[in-house]
Image (tube, grey):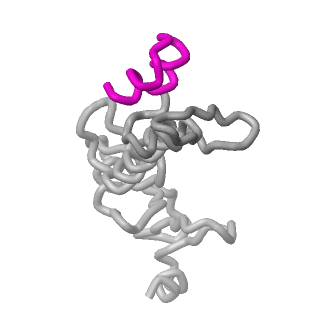
Amino acid sequence: MMYDMKECGLLKFSKRVDSLSVQVLFLYPDSPVVLHISDFRNLGNQYHMYYGESYLQCAQCGLTIKRKNNTHKYCLNCAAEMYIKKSVESVMRHKSPPSTKQNTLHITYLGETKGLAEWADQLNIPYQRLYGRIYRCGWSVEKAFER
């Protein structure tokens, strides 16, 4: 259908191979471009944005979305993806570091010797908290593990 519209002189495609931009020519093939449509997923929103209504381009994917407030920059899908990405990064930041033979802090507790990261996982206490109790606050191993 779009090819037929191009042949009739109603559409003009971008010359770039990777571009999906299309110019719509309503009256005459030589008429000036009035509205440049970059995304057909929401053609109506682009039309409203052209006429000055409160719409913006998503900062991540370029989708035209209705502006809700001045801090709103992303469409729902991109906002959800960014939230998940930030949550994963936060969890990874707070996860105990993997133990390596060179920097493992070995601690003996109840006759068993393990790395501090392994104890943290087993006792379900954050690694940073155990490390702080033992090495910064100077607590005994028993006090740090049992509180």
Q: Quadrant of the C terminus?
A: top left
Compared with 29, 53 (above or below) is: above
- 120 with respect to 54 (left or right): right
The magenta region covers: 130-147
Q: Nearer the viewer, residue 4 or 116?
A: 116
**Could you say where residue 77 lies in the image, as x and y percent from the top left?**
35, 56
Residue 72: which quarter of the image?
top left
> Which residue appears at 62% of the width and 34% of the height?
106
User: Is 134 included in the stretch rendered in magenta?
Assistant: yes
Q: Nearer the viewer, residue 90 or 47?
A: 90
Q: Quadrant of the N terminus?
A: bottom left
Q: Nearer the viewer, residue 89 or 76?
A: 89
> Which residue appears at 70% of the width and 43% of the height?
100
User: Is 8 included in the stretch rendered in magenta?
Assistant: no
**Could you say where residue 84 lies in the image, as x and y percent from the top left?**
39, 50
**Could you say where residue 111 lies in the image, as x and y percent from the top left?**
51, 39
| View extreme (left): residue | 68
Compared with 59, 34 (above or below) is: below
Please state the total of marks drawn on the protein image.
0
> Which residue appears at 39% of the width and 35% of the height?
125
| View extreme (top): residue | 137
Most common SS among magenta residues: helix
Q: Nearer the viewer, residue 129 or 25?
A: 129
Compared with 94, 25 (above or below) is: below
**Could you say where residue 91 lies in the image, as x and y percent from the top left?**
44, 42
| View extreme (right): residue | 102
| View extreme (front): residue | 111
> Which residue appears at 52% of the width and 81% of the height?
6
